[in-house]
Image (cartoon, rainbow, N blue to C red):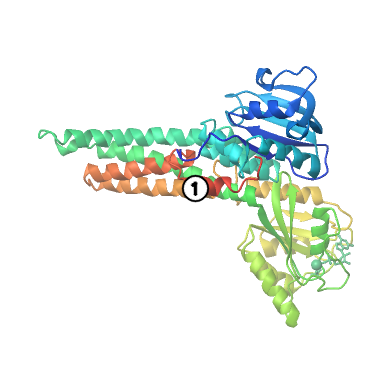
Amino acid sequence: MAKSVSLDDTIVAISTPIGESGIGIVRISGKDAFSIAKEIFSSKGHRPVSKMRTFTTHHGHIVNNLNGGEVIDEVILTVMRAPKTYTRENIVEINCHSGMVPLKKVLNLVLSSGARLARPGEFTKRAYLNGRIDLAQAEAVLDIIRSKTDASLKTALAQLSGELSKKVKALRVEILKVHSKIEAIIDFSDQDSVDESSLNGQKLVLDVDKIVGRLDRIISSFEQGQILREGLKMVICGRPNVGKSSLMNAFLRRDRVIVTPLPGTTRDSIEEVVNIGGLPLRIIDTAGWVSAPDYVAYHSIKRTSSSVISADLVLLLLDGSQPLIDEDKKIFQKIRSKKFIVVINKIDLPLAFKLDDIIRMTKQKKIIKISATKKTGLELLEKEIVDTVWQGGLGVTAPPLVSNVRHKDILARVRQDMARAKNGITKKTSPEIIAIDLKSALDNLAEIAGETATEDLLENIFSQFCIGK
Ligand SMILES: Nc1nc2c(ncn2[C@@H]2O[C@H](COP(=O)(O)OP(=O)(O)OP(=O)(O)O)[C@@H](O)[C@H]2O)c(=O)[nH]1
Ligand SMILES: [Mg+2]
C-alpha cells in the first residue's frame, strides 16, 4: 500500500454541487476536524464538538471569531467519530444554506482555521489508505456516482460490497496452494534423494486449469460490464422514410430528430442515450440507405455503414405500408452478420406485403410490429431488446463481476502467468521457473485490491473523482 501520502492534514471540501439548492455540505475530515469545528461553531448549549456523541446532529451558527464573531450561516452540524466513519477519521459535516456565498465563506473559514482543501477523491482515498475499503471498492464508489442506470448501479454496488474482492481473494488462495506445492518441490530437490516424480504434474495441471477457468469466466463478464457502463450501441437502420427518426423520438419521448414526409430527411448519424428496462442504450438514428446516392447522401451512407459496423444491436426497420423492394433486401445483406431485430413500422396503415416474405428473407420468425407515431408495440419492442441483451446472442446473463478496464487488464495478465505456469508444469520445466510465474500471478492479483498500488496509479484513479467525494 502506498504510504507516502500524509494523513496528518485535516482536509475540507464542499461536498455538494455548487448552485442554488436547499442545502450544501462542507465536509471536514482529519485529526483536527473537531477542534476546527469547535472554533467556528456556536450552539445554544455551547457544548464543544469534541464532547458531542458520534452520529448526532446539532443546530447552531457558523461564526467568524477572527472577525468579531460575524455570523456566517445558520447550520446543522453532524459529528462522526473515528474509526466508524467514511474515512476512518473524525468527520464533521456542516449543512449550510446552499449557494456560492455561504458555502464559500464557510469553506474559507475552515481553511483559515487550519484545514487544507481536499484534492479530488481524497476522502475516498483516505478510506482506502486507512484500510476501510480496498482499491476495487474505491473504484466502485466512482462507478456508483457515475452510474446511469439500475443495472450499472447494481454492478457497482456489488463491487463496493466486495464481491470482486472476494473472488480475487479466493483466486489468490488457489494460486497460493499451487505455489506452495511448487515451493515444496524446490525445497525437497535440495536434498539429493528426491526423485523428479514428486512433481505430480497431472494434479497440478488440473489445479491450474481450474484457476484459469475461473479467470476466464470473470474476464468474459467484462464485456457485459462494458455494455452496462458505456451503453449498448443500438443502430436503427432502414431505407429512407420508413420512420427511423420517428422511432428514435418515440424512444426518447421527445421530438429530438426532425421528421418529415420526405425521404432523405436525416443526413447524419444521431446518437442519444436512453434507459430501456434498466439498460443504458446508445441509440443511433441513421440516414436512410439508398442505392443511388447523391453527393451528400454518399457521405451520409458512409456514416450509416460505420455506425452499423460498430453496433452491438441493429433494428432493421421496414415500412409496413409499402411493398418490400430490392433496397430492403440490400440493407438486410449489410446488417445480417450483426445481431438484429426485425421491426415493421406503420402498422396503423394496411400491411403492403406478406409477413412470410420477411420471414423468408431474414430467417427470423420473431417480427415486432409497431407504429412509431401512434406509439403502439413499443413496449413489446423494448422487451425484445432487453431479452436479446440479457439472454440472447450478446451473451449477457447477469450483472458482471468486472466492469473496469484496469481490473480486466490485471486479470488478463494473471491468466497469462497461469498459462505459462501450466506450460512449465506439462513440459516439466524447472520448478524455480514455474514458481516465478506463479509469484508474478500473485503480485498482479494484489494490484486489484491495491495492496501493491503505486502513487501514480492512485493519483490516476482518485483524480477522476470530484472534489468532496
Ligand atoms: N402512419 C404512420 N406514419 C409514420 C409512422 N412512423 C413514421 N411515419 C411517417 O413517415 C414519414 C417519415 O418518417 P421519418 O421518421 O422521418 O422517417 P426516416 O426513416 O427517419 O426517414 P429518413 O430520415 O428520410 O431516412 C413521416 O411523415 C412520419 O410521420 C407510423 O408509425 N405510422
Ligand atoms: Mg430520419
Image location (x, y in percent) of residue 325: 76, 73
Pick the quarter of the image with the C terminus: top right
- For the point 61% across and 44% down, which residue is it? 119
Of 257 and 132, nearer the camera is 132
Of 40 and 304, nearer the camera is 40
In terms of image quadrants, where is residue 286? bottom right
Q: Is residue 48 above or below residue 2?
A: above
Left or right side of 438 for 190: left
Q: Residue furthest front?
A: 68
Image location (x, y in percent) of residue 405: 53, 50
Q: Is mark 1 within 8 Å of ligand 2?
A: no
Q: Looking at the picture, which amino acid does disc 1 mark? A: Leu
Image location (x, y in percent) of residue 77: 74, 27
- For the point 72% across and 29% down, which residue is it? 40
In terms of image quadrants, where is residue 248? bottom right
Q: Residue furthest left?
A: 192
Of 166 and 124, nearer the camera is 124
Left or right side of 395 for 100: right
Question: Dividing the image into four equal quarters, which quarter contains ligand 2?
Answer: bottom right
For mark 1, what is the residue? 457
Left or right side of 87 for 245: right
- For the point 81% across and 63% down, which residue is it? 245
Task: Indicate the secondary structure of the residue bearing disc 1.
Answer: helix
- For the point 79% across and 63% down, which residue is it? 244
Q: Is residue 349 above or below residue 466?
A: below
Is residue 337 in view from this perspective?
A: yes
Image location (x, y in percent) of residue 32: 61, 29
Pick the quarter of the image with the N terminus: top left
Is residue 404 in view from this perspective?
A: no
Q: Please give the count of numbered marks on the rendered protein.
A: 1
Binning the other alpha carbons within 10 Å of mark 1 as few (below 14), some (14 to 19) or many (20 upward) gives some
Of 385 and 416, nearer the camera is 416
